[in-house]
Structure formats: structure tokens, C-alpha cells
Image (cartoon, coloured by chain):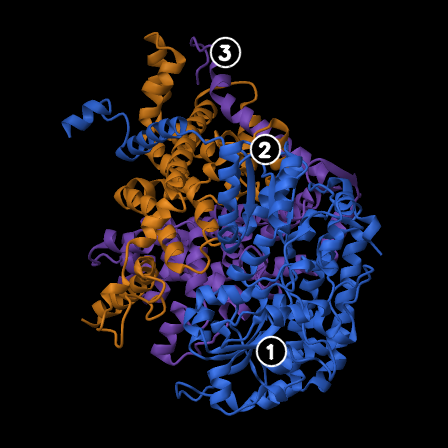
Chain colours: A blue, B orange, C purple
Amino acid sequence: MAMKRSILGSGYLSPGSAIVMLIAAVSTVVVLVWPIEKRQGLEFWTFSKTHSQMYAEQLKTWNAQADAEGAHPRVNLFVIDMTALVRRTLSSFWADTPVADMIEVEGNTIGRYVAGPLEDVGFVDLTDLLQEEGIYDLVNPPSFSLWTSRGRVFGLPHDVHPVMLCYRADIVEEAGIDVSEIETWDDFARVLAPLIKDLDGDGRPDRYLLNTWYTNTEWIEPLMLQAGGGTFDESGELIVASKANALVISTIIHWCFGEGRIAIDAPEFSPAANHLKIEGRVVASLMPDWLASTWKNDMPQLSGKLKLMPLPAWEPGGRRTSVYGGTMIAIPKSTKNFDEAWAFVKHLYLSEELAEELYRTTNIITPVRRYWDSDYFNEPDPYFQGQAPGAMYIALAPDVPPRTSSPFRPLAMTRIGEAINDLRKYAQANDIYEVDGLMPEALRLLEEAERRVRAEMSRNVFLTEVTP
Amino acid sequence: MFRKLAVYTPLTLFAAITLVPFLYLACSSLKTNDVFFSSPFLPIDSAWWDINWSGLTLDNFKRLFQEAGIGRAIVNSFFFASTMAVLGTLGSAMGGYALAKFNFLGRGMFTNIVLTALIIPGALLLAPGYKVLYTLGLLDSYAGLILPGVAPAFGVFLFRQAFVSGLPTEMMEAGRIDGCGEVRMFFQLALPMVRPMVGAFLLITYLGTWNNFIGPQIVLQTPEKYPLAVAVAQLRGPYGSEYGMIMAGTIVAILPVLILFLMLQKDFIAGLTAGSVKG
Amino acid sequence: MSRGTRTPWWAPYLFIAPFAVAFCVFTAYPLFESIVMAFLQTSGPKRSEYVGLSNFSWMWEDPDFHKAVRNTVIFACGSIFIQLPCSLGLALLLNRPDIKGRAFWRMIFFAPSLVGLAFVAILAGLVFEKNTGLLNVALHQVIWFDPEFPWLQEYVMPALIISAFWMYVGFNMVYFLAALQNVNTDLLEAAQVDGAGPLHRFRHVTIPAIRPVATFVILLSLIGSFQLFELPYLLLNNSGGPDNQGLTIVMYLYQKGFDWGDLGYASAVGWVLALLLSVFAIIQRILSKTEVA
């Protein structure tokens, strides 16, 4: 005590104050002497840990070359939380805060970057370069649609992302069911119905047929696109209140509630939901090519128990695939090394090595068409009982529906989400769970949603050229 | 006996509800991914007494420091919170001292400003504040976070009350007659008289800053500058499927303040209630 | 005061300077700026266009804003009508003269409020999960509760209110506990001698004594509730959650201003929020004045 008193100057400070001031002094010194490293070379941001693993090998070679020959700068790759990546990128567009030289952009976030006037988009407009260098002809054309705003392309696409249906072959086959009988979603519900079961004997069914939920609009959008609906068509017209969308949302409610329930909520990337999948409580899930690798990583237990098949169609003879997710790589205008960054971007995204690596580590099929007949796409995959997913996805790639990059797409999806929720309330209040019974109300709700989207769009004074 | 039961049963129940999430947090941070869902608390094999000790690990913490670089965020949080607390307390004490103990032109105006500023919601200043920081070139710097908080109205108000009741004007007169300079008088005579308020306000500001999320989220852009609140929230991207890591990050983020404040709870609670009882 | 002594004229100005400068630069100027901005539509801080009153009229029309206000009000009601009474109850229990280990109990109840909202949100994300979350698992085992209960899909506001309850019930208890020290024990005893029942004593002796603190705590809760942001923002992964069920006013402001770059609209929203809060503050001031009179 005496000791303390002499140090603290005869009790000038209370112990709490003394501790806080001590922390302030020490931490200030530490922060001052701990420099933030200036990185050599180019900075490259991605939001996906899988991508970073996939690029690791090529980056190593690239950087070894950089160190040995000095022909090009090193590239440093950082994995950054998606929200943070978007915020930091936007902040650099608005306020010139530091940003990377190359950024991978996720499909759902593109609208944010193109929400202002065209000249304010902080990414380099690559349209002319792509034309001059003949890159347009190399890449699967629909893959550009998501990255094009007002006719200008802001990045190089990374993927095609067709969607298939992944099902628990072990469970299906044990029950003696033959999935080749399934052509439409109605067939799907009818043929697999015997698999809905109460596994733990508490009187409630625990196993359901399809991983989807009426709140999970992100995964309802591919179903709408498959049916020919969505938010905006290729010419930028609003198509929220389409028959196709009404059919999809009515069906979703039908699937989630009432006698006809076949859906279970097991969202992707959730360890909790993965647990449900491993326990066999989910029979089938929508599976874009990229998701297969996520499953392999997160749920190795399911190896050999799964199989893929084209999506059931919305009507006989209809489209058997859809599209979900997507990434591009873009170069911010603020970079001081555009030529070097562009060289690296092409080297990475268009290389044959990456196409193979892309498929082998992440199950993603390349958008570069000339590699599509490579042998590795035909190799059997033990995770899917020896099927060759690559060839199956490529067969569906030409049917992938086009998408919009409209900054109003998230808004339109929010309104559709509300329409779905209102439809759920309507269904529960009136005890109507059949698709036909729900259709008129669904259409009415979607029309209301479309009206609201239009109102919000006409408010924006910076995007007059995309406003109807 | 019945009376006792009626008092201690609700207390115990509430205490359990309060503590269970902490227990859950602690157990979760020690579990490996494989056994994470085997039970809510310690990993088990077949029944609750059959604890699977091999499912426990310190790996999450190790990786937090080695892979995710949380060490830097801890230092940043200590720096941000303590500097803000010291500067904020000093500025508030000075302001409160001026309003309580001096007669000067503008005193009434400043007092009214302080009282009005008390009810300005922080959210109102977010958008224009961002623009001001942009104009001043303070985005992505700690100065941009700390300078706006050097003399919060709330602090000035509390210290004004404290000086009015805690510092006799005669003492100051006596000091002046002895030839004591104004600055020296503030530090040597005035501040010691409101020692409890100094301690309390330091701690309140420290805690508030440590837990501040929206400020750093908007202002800071360089990962090496992130404090824990932002750094831990961002673990959920790259480590989204590893709950153990996220829970370990949360523990690392709350433990330092928890320890500090449970040690100093008297000071702290005195500070909290000072605003309400006197104000 | 200091009249007649040798007080240098600059002394008060020196002491008020940090407040004056910080206030002018970081409060007054932005406040002025935000008045101007409320009439602009912006795309980041660099680009803006005058739009008149349309920001306010759009707020009036936008169903998202209505939802944000409704959610915020629901949350505030949860704080005031569920949380505060429990805080008061705990304080009354702890205030009993025969209680053992008062400091110990107080410490336990108080601990959650030391955890930042951001961290509570991260923790709550796991606790409220369907099928595997702590809450559903525990309730399922104890009272056969539906393990699929969709907290984060359909019951977002209750989940938020429960999280905030856990966090702040002990915090507010500390205020009430301090206020209960003002209760005149002689008066209580006299009332007991006169045969007043416990409810009667509570109403006529305890309540008037803690009223100033109670109105203060209610105001504090209201202001805090109306600025709710971190908890839903992080709990719902940086969005309003399914069907915007967890969208709050400040989150709405944040989304418009910082996700979409319309700082002008965000300023307009900020002013509406400020207006709401000043109404509460005025009501509180009137209430505490009438009580003195």
C-alpha cells in the first residue's frame, strides 16, 4: 500500500484511473512502435477462403518468378470478410481510402458498386479491352451478363455456376425409388414422398425432401430464374409480377406448410444446418457447381452417399438448370499499376492451369469454353458415387438463364421476399396451401411489389438512364 | 424458511440465466469442430456424464493469434479505449470546471449547448460526420475516432455537477492568493476534489469505447487498425463455419473488460449512478 | 464567484476550449451540414443533387421505413414493459435488509452489460439457431419445446428483446438499487405500523421515492432502444433479416447512407429520429417537474 501510494503520488488517482492511464501509456507506445507493414507489389482481395486456397499454387509460382526475374511485381492475396470487403471498396470509391489493386466481387454485391452514375463506378471499364484482346470470344457469353451495367463490363467472370439437384442416393435407393421417373417438381414431390419420416420418434417428421424455406429468398431466386421469372429481364425491364414468379412463390409456400410440406430449412454455410444434412434429415438440395466443394470440405461424412441430377423442371420439357452465385475480378481505377494488374488478372483467370485447378479444388467449371472438353471433367468423383459432375454441369451450361446487374435487384428481391411472407400469412389465415388456390393472391402481391420497386427506382436522380 | 425460499429462488434462477451464456461461450470456444454439436456445453459421447475430453482443445485460441492476427486487434482496442478515456475525461473535466467555477461571457450559452447536446442522437451525426472526417482527411485514422470524443457533452455535464458540489470556491480563492497558477490549480487542487467522478468517467468511457462497433466500422479501413469489436465480427467471414474460432474470438474480446470491471466494480457503479441520482 | 480576484480573463476559455472546438467541428458543423444534406440526394460524399423535401416524403411512403419504426417501437416497449419491471423486481429483492452477499449478486447480474452489443450479437447468433441453438435445445429437453422454433426466421424481435433483456436487466437494476437507498425506512415502518399492506406501502412510499430515477431510467432505455443498431445488424448478418423483421431506424439509416451512399437521405432519417427523441426528453422533463411541484 505504501509502495502504491508513493508511485501514484499520495493517492492522486484512484486505482481504476491509475490502471486506465497505465494502459493508455503502454498501448500508445506499442501502437507507435508497431509499424503497419508496407506491402511490396500488388494487393489482391478475395472474400472466399476456397478461392485463396485455389490460387495458392499459381501465386507461389508467380511470386517466385517475381523474386527471381523481377519481370512483374509480387501479388499478395488477402481473404477479407465479405461485408468488410464491400465497405472498404465502396469507401475507396467515395472517399479515396486505400484499396487493393485487384478485387474479387461477389454477384450479390455488384449492384452496390454500380449504384451511381457510370463515371462514378470505381472499377476500370474493361469493355473495349475485352473486345480488342478477343476475350469476349473466349468466355461463355451469359457469364458477362452479371457484370455488365448500362452496356459496360467491369470485370472478368470467374465462372458459369449452373445448378443441379443433389440428393441422398443412399436414402433414396434404400427405399427402392428410381429418380429417373422425376422430370418436374411435381414428380419430385410425389415420387419421393415416402421418405418424409419421423426419425427420433417424437411424433414430428424430422426428414424432409427439399432444402429450401420461404424466408431464404437467396435460394428462391434461382428457382424463379429457372421458371423464366426473376427481377429484371435482359433488356432491363422489371418482371417481378410475372406468372413464373407467382408460380414459384405459391409452390414454395405449398412446400413449406400444410399437408404437402416437403421443405426443411437447412441453409448453406451453417454448421448447424450441415449437422441436419449429415443426420439425413434433408433428402435433396439445390447445388450449383461451387457448392459441391463446400460440401466436400464441410461434410466429408457424406462422401459416397450423394448423387447429382438435373433440376426438376417447372413444366414438362422445361429448363433443367438455373444459376446461383458468381464472382468476377475487377481492377479499381485508383490502382497505380493497371497494366501489371491486368496482366495478372488475365494470367490467372484465363489460364488452363486455373481451369483445371478451379475444377479440381472447387468443382467450379471454367467460363473459358475452349477448356470444356478437357479430360478431367469426365473423371468419376467418389463423393458423388462415381458420377462425373464436371461433364454434367457443362452439359447444362448453355441453358443457364441470364441475369441482371441492376442496382435495384436487391431491392426487388426484398419486395419479393415480403410478397412471399404475405403469401404465407394469407395461406395460414385462410388455410389454403394448394398452388392453384394461392396463385391469384401471389400474383396480386407481386404486382404490389413491382409497383413499389418502380416507385423507388423513379426516386433515384443519379440513375436516370436505368430508370424506366 | 418460506420467505428465504421466495427470495433466493428467483435470485438463483436469474443468476443461472445470466451465467449460462457465459458458460456456453467458454465451453464452445474449447470444442473442436467435430464435436461442436454433440451437446451444448462440454462435448459428450453417449450420455451427459460421458464427457469426451479429446474433443476439447486450445487450438482455436492458438489459431486466433497465429492465423487471424487477433493480437494486433487487442493492442488496438487497449489503445483506442484507454486513450479515448483519458482524453475524454480530461476534456470533460476541463469543460465542467469552466462552467461550474468561472463567470465568463458565454457561460450561459455553453451551459445551454451542453444540455441540448445531451439529447442529440449519435446516429444523426453519422452521415454528416463521415463527410467532415472525409473533408479533414481523418478517415481511416484513429484521430478520426478520438478527436470527436475529446470532450463529450455528457462528460462536461457530469463534471459540472461534480465541481459545483465538490469544490468550494473559497479553496480556489485561497489558492489564487497563494499565487497558484490557473493550470496548476486545476490539476493539483480541482481534480483531486472530484476524484470519484474522474475514476468513474474514465471507466465508463473506457467500456463504451471498447465496445464501440459502428464508429470504427465506418471510419477505419485498414485491417491492422481494427479494434476487437470489428475484428471479431469479421471472423465470421473467413471462419464462418468454425464456431469454435468465433466463440474464442468473442471470449478474447470480452475477457479483458470483464476482468477489469469486476475488479473495479465499486468505482464503476458509482459513476453510472452519479448521472441519475444527482442529475 | 471569482469577481474581484486576480483571475486571468483567459482561464475559463482555456478550460472550455476542448469542448468548444470539438463541439464546433464534430457536432455543430455536421449538424448544420446535415440540415443542408437532408434536402439532397447523394452518391457518396462527393456527389449530390438538391431534391427538396422528397427525402421526407419518401420516408413517409417507404414501407421499409414504416417497418423500421414499428420494429424500433416494439423493441422499446419490450425494454420498458418487460425489462425494467424485472430490473425493479431484482432491485427490490436485493434491497431487502436480510439479503446475504448483495455485492456478489449484483456483480453477477451486472456482468452481461459489460459485454458489448457487437459481441452479444455474435453469441446470440448461435444461441438462437434452429435445431442446434442453445435455447431451442435446452427448451426442447426441459419443456418439449419445438426444436425447430424459428427465432431468427419469424421471431426476430422477440429474439432481440430477449438478448437485450439478458444484457441490460442487471444494468438497470443498479440504477433502481441506488434509487431505493432514497426510500425513507422510517416512513415504511410507520406505514407498516398503521397496517398498510406491502402493495400499499410500495405504491405510496417506495414509488414516489424512486420516481425521479425511474423516469431517468425510462428515458435512458428509450434513447438506447431508439438507437438500436449493432445487435440486429450483426445478429442478422448485416441485413434486416428475413422480411426486414429486424430492421431498426438506425439500421435503415446506415443501409441507406453507408451501403448505398445516400448520405443525404440518411441525414433526413437522422433528423426524424432526433425529433422523436427530443419529444421523449421533453415529456420526461415535464414529468419530473410535475412531480417536484
Q: In which quadrant is the N terminus of chain B drawn? A: bottom left
Compare residues C68 and A270 and report the one nearer the observer: A270
Judged left or right of residue A142, residue C110 is left
Q: CA distance from mark 2 to mark 3?
A: 27 Å
Q: Could you tell me which secondary element the residue under label 3 belongs to? A: loop
Res. C33 in view: yes
Q: CA distance from mark 2 to mark 1?
A: 61 Å
Circles 2 and 3: CB distance less than 8 Å?
A: no
Q: Which mark is residue B25?
A: none
Circles 2 and 1: CB distance less than 8 Å?
A: no
Q: Which mark is residue C27?
A: 2
Q: Could you tell me which secondary element the residue under label 1 belongs to? A: strand
Q: Position of residue B7 (x, y in %)?
A: 26, 66
The residue under label 3 is: C9
Amino acid type of disc 1?
Met
The quarter of the displayed image where residue B227 is located: top left
Q: Are marks 2 and 3 on the same chain?
A: yes
Amino acid type of disc 3?
Trp
Chain to which mark 2 belongs: C
Residue drawn at point x = 32 percent, y = 26 percent: B193
Judged left or right of residue A451, residue C79 is left
Looking at the rendered image, the disc whose residue lies closer to the viewer, 2 or 1, is 1
The residue under label 1 is: A309
